[in-house]
Image (tube, grey):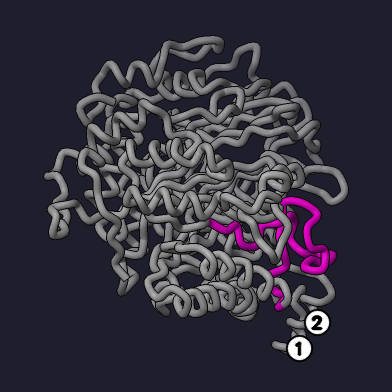
Amino acid sequence: MTGGHLGRETLVLLLPALVGIAWAQAAAPPVADEHTLLLAHFNGTLNADFARGSPQADVTGAELVAQGKWGGCVSLGDGQYLSFDPQGNLDMSAGSLMFWFKPKWRAPTVHSHALLSMGLDGEPVGYFVLSQGWWETGGGGGRMYFVYDNQAYMHASSTAMMTLGEHLNDWHHLTLTWSEGKPGQNALYLDGMRIARTVKHCGQVRRPRTRLFIGSDQGTGMGHKRWANALLDELVIYDRALSEQEVAAAFQAQEPRWEEIQARRWAWLTDVLKGPAPVFKRDEQGRVLESRALLDEGYPWADPKKVPEVVDKLKRAGFNVYIPCVWHGRGTRWPCRLEPPEAGLQEAYARPDPDPLAYLIEQCHANGIEVHPWFCVCKRERDLHPEFVEEGTPRRMFDAHRPEFRDFIVSLMLDVVRRYEVDGINLDYIRTGGLCTGPKCRAEYRAKFGTELTDDVKLRGENNWPNPKVVQWQNEAIGDIVRRVAEEGRKIRPRLIISVDGHPRPPTEPPDTNGRNELPWVQAGWVDVVYGMDYGRHLAVARVDAVRQALDKPAAIVELVGNYERSEQGKVVPREGKLVADLISFCRRKWRGNGSALYLYSMLSEEQIEALRAGPFKEQAVPRWVR
């Protein structure tokens, strides 16, 4: 990106020359080659035109219509789907699946939509699915999910589909890629661009136990009630995971307007950056009043010798709010009388002086930088405090329904507020992490509502939203932590800023059933800032607009953008400095209020620092909060 807009040269680089796959010529449907396992054009027949296994489609209500991307296509409405036998037609060890898709629904959509699904074997059984929105306890959140193997926790998701605005109901090219092993990966692409990816060790994933269903959730075993409600065309399955360049090339070969679409894809950013520069209030000394936060999940500051280096880096980049993680669910990262330190810090923290956190705060304050310690509240990363979990507690989480745990974690946060000159407290993992189905949880739910938790979670409320009783039960546990930290913390430090990290939802979407429903916390005055975690290259602009419009205090919503990418090998690397600076510039212009925020300190490169100081952070600023 140069000069705030995409030129033809950039487009050519983003969609490189065709490599490795024998695609058809430009502006033509795909053709089969030696890597093709199944190809269905849906022209005159719902059966596959080419298949290594059976080409026969098992059809339930699906209809052929003439309005395809290329010729005919299949129409998938309520109760309409088709399926193929995966034997010979799909390889779970590695593969790619792509198709053209034209949704009939609008944004925001109340209901979730199953595009593809397939049951997997094992005990417990698993599933492979592509879904717009979610249907389990976590709610949809406006995201598209590709789950390669749910039991291996191989999944990726993105809000990109719901940010297309007036172009949502155009034809779009969707691609899934996957491979098992060490590492394994699964990725999701929209119109030739990767929008989500997970890379991690997964070993051998599970194998199919059902047919591959197109347009239905039948393969998930989750109710068989969600439908694609869309047109679908040109289904292709390959025997290997295509690269990012190959997926982009396939899109280019099949879309004659790819350059126009590529330029439009970035219009949300470039149109705002072309506008006038933002004007900020200034203090008596003429300094810009603007909060600029940087989150640090590591702890380089735990060594007092490195504190000056940390502070210098923050200062040079133009940040004035530092959010260092002091609790990641595996011990404290500050000298604490209530809880042992994290592994690797015991020896350092056995020496009473200097206190690294106190020294960090002192040095930051001397340089005009606020410090807001960060707690991963309910996260449990090692076998810590077994008394706060039971069989049925969500994996790698503490049970937020245990009053003893809530007392414990609130006391830890208040210990930091009481002992250190902090400016704020940041709450992450402020959610249950799922549904606790242990005996204590079931008994407490039964005593409160007079019904069974395991029965109620299967019942839906109005608009097919989650059962209000389950939502209430989860909300009360998490809300108790937020309220107590806010009220007790401000008794100690009246100007204390309370922030949370989350995915705030507009009222048009179902509530989160993990207890993380941020808007009521803001309205109640418990929370000053909600950092909306949005680390992709494209921000969920329409979603942020909808959330802010629903609040009396829109300044509380701050988009937390990312400064990192994952390489093809899964390695985390710094994002290009120009894009990081442009994303921050966009947020400063588009959404005024409690400043801007960036994740992650360890990925803050010199290139990014240079771009920030040449652009949005050209002037140093003094933190300012709208409460």
Residue bearing mark 1: 447
| Residue occupying image coordinates x 14% and y 44% | 277
Magenta residue check for 315: no
Q: Quadrant of the N terminus?
A: top left
Residue bearing mark 2: 443
Amino acid type for the residue under numbered disc 2: Ala
What residue occupies the far front of the structure in this picture? 353
Task: Characterize the local packing of mark 1: few (<14), some (14-19) or many (20 or more) Cα atoms within 10 angstroms.
Answer: few
- Residue 186 versus residue 290 in the image, above or below: above
Q: Give the image quarter of residue 36.
A: top right
Q: Which residues are magenta?
A: 374-403
Q: Is residue 350 left or right of residue 480?
A: right
Residue 65 showing in the rendered view: no
The foreground one among 382 and 62 is 382
| Residue occupying image coordinates x 45% and y 63% | 421
Q: Is residue 237 left or right of residue 295?
A: right
